[in-house]
């Protein structure tokens, strides 16, 4: 799907192999009057991104089967039609180096688990309100 | 009710108190109910119970992952094993299933091929923590549906 430049997209790509996280993130996105486009792993997200760039933001899990979050970020940042989409990386890792590598790959926000529902909600709200140049470490 | 009966009932209750306290402690140990119940803030008005939905999703997914961990350990597939352990750690942490998440973290850090005994013990610990957490989550689910 090609984005209509005259309107702001309300669609958010959610790629996570954890059904609990997918359900949580989708619930929050819908509450914030956006639509979640869900992928169960990195490869499914990659396939969506190959033909669809109409996204307001993307929320990616760091560790997923077939293709990791970091690889997806690198792909998105290398494609002109995807490079302006703000990306939030979610991870169960506590390693500070991963935050650095996420940002250097082009992530806009980084959210390590465990977080409270409030933190997740605010991180998504900030992501949906952010522009490509900003960075958020939640 | 006679005085004697009341006394007996009270004694029975008192006798059960430490056991009940133990159950409550174990339950709250296994799952961070405060974190889990904080998801109530995200509840929609459509009559569904988000926490019940999350519990159902977690129990279904985590049971499969626990099984996958067992199978990967039996097959000595360390790469798959670490990957599934990592996934279980993440989903457990996000719902406040602390002890499972903590045990998974220890399993991730241990070198399974160098310390198979320690790894085996931790796997057993993870199984029993998961059983405790499942019990706590199921009882929370039942409480919410009443």
Image: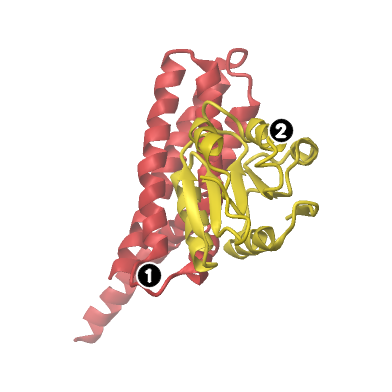
Q: Which residue is located at x 49 percent, y 54 percent?
A: A36
Q: In which quarter of the image is residue A131?
A: bottom right
- Colour in which chain B is shown? red
Q: Is residue B87 visible?
A: yes
Q: Disc 1 designates what residue?
A: B14
Q: Position of residue B65 (x, y in %)?
A: 42, 33
Specify whether B50 is left or right of B12. Answer: right
Circle 2 marks a residue in which chain?
A: A
Q: Quadrant of residue B145?
A: bottom left
Asked if badges 2 and 1 are on one and the same chain, I answer no
- Vertical placement of B77 versus A73: above or below? above
Q: Disc 2 designates what residue?
A: A78
Toward the viewer: A28 or A34?
A34
Q: Is mark 1 on a helix, strand or loop?
A: helix
Residue B54 numbered mark, or none? none
- Colour in which chain A is shown? yellow
Q: Where is residue B141 in the image (x, y as percent from the top left)?
A: 34, 60
Q: Position of residue B39 (x, y in %)?
A: 50, 64
Q: Distance between the residues labelled 2 and 1?
A: 68 Å
Toward the viewer: A118 or A132?
A132
Binning the other alpha carbons within 10 Å of mark 1 as few (below 14), some (14 to 19) or many (20 upward) gives few
Circle 1 marks a residue in which chain?
A: B
Specify whether B73 is left or right of A49. Answer: left
| Circle nearer the viewer, 2 or 1 | 2
Q: Position of residue B81 (x, y in %)?
A: 51, 23
Specify whether B112 is left or right of B68. Answer: right
Specify whether B18 is left or right of A99. Answer: left
Toward the viewer: B123 or A64?
A64
Q: Which residue is located at x 47 percent, y 61 percent?
A: A27
Q: Which residue is located at x 43 percent, y 35 percent?
A: B127
Q: Can residue B134 be seen in this view?
A: no
Q: Which image quarter is the C terminus of chain A in?
A: bottom right
């Amino acid at each position: 799907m090609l984005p209509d430049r005259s309107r702001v997209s309300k669609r958010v790509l959610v790629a996570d192999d954890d059904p609990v996280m997918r359900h949580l993130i989708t619930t929050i996105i819908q509450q914030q009057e956006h639509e979640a486009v869900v992928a169960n792993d990195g490869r499914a997200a990659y396939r969506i991104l190959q033909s669809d760039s109409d996204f307001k933001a993307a929320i990616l899990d760091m560790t997923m089967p077939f293709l990791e979050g970091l690889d997806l970020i690198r792909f998105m940042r290398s494609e002109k039609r995807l490079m302006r989409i703000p990306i939030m990386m979610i991870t169960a890792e506590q390693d500070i180096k991963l935050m650095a590598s996420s940002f250097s790959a082009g992530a806009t926000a980084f959210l390590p688990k465990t977080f409270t529902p409030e933190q997740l909600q605010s991180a998504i709200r900030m992501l949906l309100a952010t522009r490509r140049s900003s960075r958020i470490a939640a | 009710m006679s005085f004697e009966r009341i006394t007996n009932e009270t004694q029975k209750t008192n006798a059960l108190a430490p056991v009940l306290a133990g159950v409550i402690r174990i339950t709250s140990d296994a799952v961070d109910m405060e974190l889990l119940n904080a998801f109530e803030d995200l509840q929609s008005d459509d009559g569904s119970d988000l926490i019940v939905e999350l519990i159902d999703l977690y129990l279904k997914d985590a049971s499969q992952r626990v099984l996958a961990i067992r199978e990967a350990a039996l097959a000595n597939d360390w790469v798959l094993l670490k990957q599934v352990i990592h996934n279980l750690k993440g989903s457990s942490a996000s719902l406040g299933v602390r002890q499972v998440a903590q045990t998974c973290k220890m399993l991730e850090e241990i070198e399974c091929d160098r310390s198979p005994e320690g790894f085996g013990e931790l796997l057993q610990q993870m199984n029993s923590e998961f059983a405790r957490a499942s019990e706590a989550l199921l009882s929370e689910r039942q409480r919410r549906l009443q």
